[in-house]
Amino acid sequence: MLKHTTRTLTAALLAGSALLGSAFAASAETLKIGYLGGLTGYLAGYDGPSLAGLKYAVEEANAKGGLNGMTVELISRDMRSETAQAAVMAQELIAEGVHVMVIPCDLDPAIAAGQLANAAKIPSISACASTPTLAAIGGDFVFSYYTADNLQAAALANHAAASGYKNAYLLISKDTPYTHKLPEYFGEVFKKKGGAVAAVGEFKMGQQDFSAEVTTLAALSPAPDVIMTSAYEPDFPAFIKALRAAGVTAPILGSDGVDSPTTLALGGVAEGVVFSNAGFPAEGSALAAFNVAFKAATGQEPDVVYYATGYDLLKLFGAAITASGGKLDGQAIRDGMDGLENVEVTTGKITYKGQNRIALRNVALNKVAGGKKTFVSNDIPAAADVPAPQ
């Protein structure tokens, strides 16, 4: 939750390398990391980039002699964005003897996998699931890494209040906690800031026709001066197209699910959309340096922040193992992770100490302008403004 650093390319990528170097003497041990994600299906746009970033980190570390002197082995499984399959694949990774497990970017499959890893006393962490109750539901060995929903909502509400908005419309879906609770968190904070919630519309995930919701919204009097939703593709593109086609021009606030090439490809329809995520690659920042290095090494454009947050997971594992005294048993890594404070990664600094295994981190606000992401602000919401997890 701190502002981006302003290091040069070399310094930015090597600063965390103390974790990749000689904290311990070279060891014959191998650190096994299990990656469980939806590499096909609706999670592919989130879990796929996260895996690509982590894979790059592992290759980089092994080329430099390993993580804390240990060779790193990355074992991945595609759970096809299906909760039942997540449980099956988690059991496979446990049988492979992984020391830590990365679990999917959506709550239900993350819980299914995390609870199995928890029972086996294997620390697990989601690269981008943002539901703030994940760690509590999953168990003592489950960690959440990405910017939590209630934290994103507070930052978006701060922005709405600072922009002078007074009357908000919320679009929710009760199909997932992410699409349900995040807008409600926003409404809670927005009202504390002096705003009002004019109405709440509801949709079903996967629906293609938003004409009924848009008709109701357009008829509101007074008209809302801002619309907030945590819908993501394919729902968000369908909604905003219908909204603009109906002549509704109110600005839209979205969450990290909007951080997608699909949104940018919408052209003028998405112009002005402001959304939250884990970081913006401002000039001179560690995130900008990562993006340059990743593209140079892989030839792939890191067009969403999930590449970087996936990359950063290895730094967290290295820091946790360092804190554990180099031990690879699950309890030691878990305890090491739980005590981490101000670990510097590409998107700022990460703290778990005293946070109930939910990462304390920065919220970046982005704006779509001319088909590109532009920087709005970094925000560290006051603790009193962050709603209690539900």
Image (spheres, grey):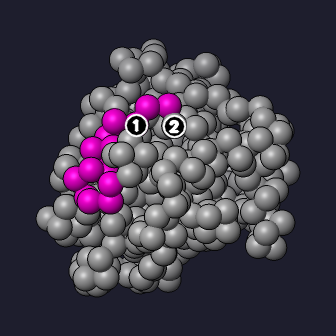
- The quarter of the picture where residue 292 lies is bottom right
Q: Is residue 87 magenta?
A: no
The residue that disc 2 covers is 343
**Secondary structure state at the residue bearing disc 2:** strand
Under circle 1, the secondary element is loop
* CA distance for labels 1 and 2: 7 Å
For image coordinates 76% across by 73% down, the residue present is 298
The magenta stretch spans which residues?
A: 327-342
List the single residue furthest toward the left: 119
- The structure residue drawn at horizontal position 14% and vertical position 65%, both measured from the top left corner, is 119
Q: Answer whether residue 336 is magenta in the image.
A: yes
Nearer to us in this view, 9 or 142:
9
Residue of label 1: 340
- Residue 74: x, y in percent? 48, 75
Q: How far from the left and from the top, in percent, is residue 329? A: 26, 59
Residue at the far front in the pictured view: 25
Above or below for 345 versus 69: above
Q: Is residue 73 above or below residue 289?
A: below
Q: Is residue 121 left or right of residue 73?
A: left
Q: Are marks 1 and 2 in contact (CB under 8 Å)?
A: yes
